[in-house]
Image (tube, rainbow, N blue to C red):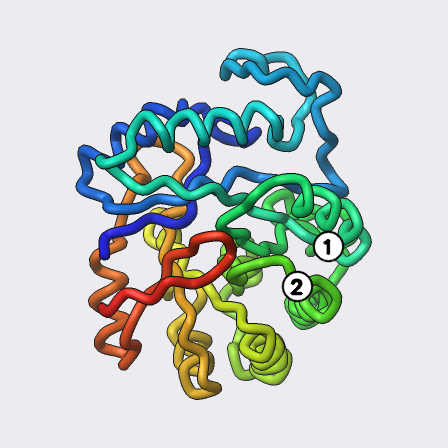
Amino acid sequence: MFTDYHLHTWFSDDSDYPMEQLVRDAITAGLAEICITDHVDYGIKGDWPDASETYHGDEKKGHPVMNVKYPAYHAEIQRLQERYAGHITIREGMEFGMQVHTIPQYKKLFAAYPFDFIIMSCHQVEDKEFWTQDFQRGRTQDEYNRRYYEEILQVIQRYKDYSVLGHLDMISRYDEAGVYSYEKVRDIIAEILRQAIRDGKGIEINTSSHRYGLLDLTPSRDILRLYKDLGGTIITIGSDTHAPQHLAAYIMETMAELREMGFASICTYRSMEPQYHQL
């Protein structure tokens, strides 16, 4: 099944991609199913004070960086689901950039909307960003890598309303010290994966690794093999699209690699329940 399960539109602070254009582009690309997963990052971003049902991309200009405008987001996905029924399946999701201290805010948000799919990502620790090096600064490579995985483990021990772990080793994308040995953090990664498997959760393969020029998949092939060895079966694939040129990139190639690694299926989601599709 040709799907893309990590997509950002102009409802995310870092994208200007109109949602309806994305849907039309997905149909043109031959995608059978997509899930819109715009950003929410409590701790470093606030909510819109105006909960209007209308939204235009130019509203973001000159405005502080904000989370998704939830009522408008939900209404637009519903509209597009109805308009393009029979042409493509559109699921409603979000990417939760979670930290332990923001869990109560995500619980409230999750309860408010009928989500199909939630990516649980870690974009910040201690409200410090990775891409700016604010989190890494003042720490050794060992310290910031282990602290990153500790935060993920602590979150998933406390929070269960998610579907998959997003780009699990994302810290490697912003590691200016170079490639960090998987063996040094294999123990805590295994603990994370065991917890996710016990809870019936999965992991995503994020194909943006190709456009970032990384030397491995995201998560790495070592992590994928470990997940399989531990009994994990739930995998989604997403391009992490923020612009038209990212849509559906490397999805087919990733499916082929999963087959070579011995995985039997990938998943889509409906009402937070995984649907398996043979590779």
Residue 170 visible? The answer is: yes
- 116 versus 19 height, above or below: below
Residues 270 and 35: in front is 270
Contact between marks 1 and 2 (CB within 8 A): the answer is: no
Give the amino acid at mark 1: Gln
Q: Earlier in the sequence, mark 1 or mark 2?
A: 1
**Relative image position of residue 112 (x, y in whole percent):** 67, 40
Residues 161 and 184: in front is 161
Q: Is residue 88 left or right of residue 49?
A: left
What residue is drawn where x is 52% and y is 77%? 181
What residue is drawn where x is 60% and y is 31%? 68
Q: Is residue 152 left or right of residue 270?
A: right
In the rendered image, which quarter is residue 260 located in? bottom left
Q: CA distance from mark 1 to mark 2?
A: 13 Å
* Mark 2 nearby-residue class (10 Å; few <14, some 14–19, many ≥20): some
Q: Looking at the rendering, in which quadrant would you find the C terminus?
A: bottom left
- 88 versus 135 height, above or below: above
Residue 160: which numbered mark, if any? 2
**Relative image position of residue 223 (x, y in whole percent):** 46, 75
Give the amino acid at mark 2: Lys
- 231 versus 272 height, above or below: below
* Residue under label 1: 99
**Relative image position of residue 171 (x, y in whole percent):** 57, 59
What residue is drawn where x is 39% and y is 50%? 5
